[in-house]
Amino acid sequence: MLQITILIMIGISTIMSANIELNVGDTAPDFSLIDQHGKEHKLSDYFGEKIVLYFYPKDNTPGCTKEACSIRDNFTLFEENNIIVFGISYDSPSSHKKFAEKYNLPFILLSDSSKSVAKLYNSNGWLIAKRNTFLIGRNGKIFKIYKNVDVTTHTEDILNDFSELENLKE
């Protein structure tokens, strides 16, 4: 019985880690998720825009709050540069709504309670999403991937990388 249990656990672990690795230059995988207001967002509807997809572990935790508030505090720069921001975690739309209201977050928080989008982006963890970010150009292609983000410098890094992309005339 113990051997069967171990084999099942190994099988589940293998399935969880069998994500397809995304690379710079790949077209961002399309998805549809619900935001904190119950509105559905389909990623491909935003192709033609500059997009930030940032996966984060959990609403109202210290690192996630610091990251979200940093984006909030610099949100005018995102708006001035026509950059759309999507925060994604496993939390429910109602949890996202409370989080956004508590910290006056002006951007979209998407609920990936099925963990399917995190899996598409190789950002899925067992209980929480991994803290990864994907920058997507107007052409719908990923041009920058951040793994294991430093929340203290992340907003600045994102804005600098979009600025460099603009200088290269995407």
Image (tube, rainbow, N blue to C red):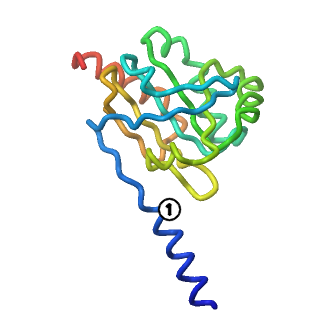
Instruction: Please name the residue shown 48% across and 49% down the image.
Output: 119
Q: Position of residue 17 (x, y in %)?
A: 45, 62
Vertical position of residue 103 compared to residue 130: above or below: above
Asked whether 63 or 115 is in front, the reply is 115
In the foreground, 23 or 12: 12
Identify whether 44 is placed above or below 4: above
Q: Position of residue 37 (x, y in %)?
A: 70, 23
The quarter holding residue 97 reads top right
**Quarter the C terminus occupies:** top left
Kindly indicate the quadrant of the structure image that contains residue 30. top left
Q: Residue at x 64, y 56 (%)?
A: 127
Dot 1 alpha-carbon crowd within 10 angstroms: few under 14, some 14 to 19, many 20 or more: some
Q: Quadrant of residue 23 in the image?
A: top left
Relative to 101, is 92 above or below? Answer: below
Q: Which residue in the structure is indicated by mark 1?
A: 16
Say which quadrant the N terminus sits in.
Answer: bottom right
Q: Secondary structure at mark 1?
A: helix
> Which residue corresponds to the image point at 77% horizontal and 29% vertical from the top-left?
98
Q: How many numbered badges does the structure rendering display?
A: 1
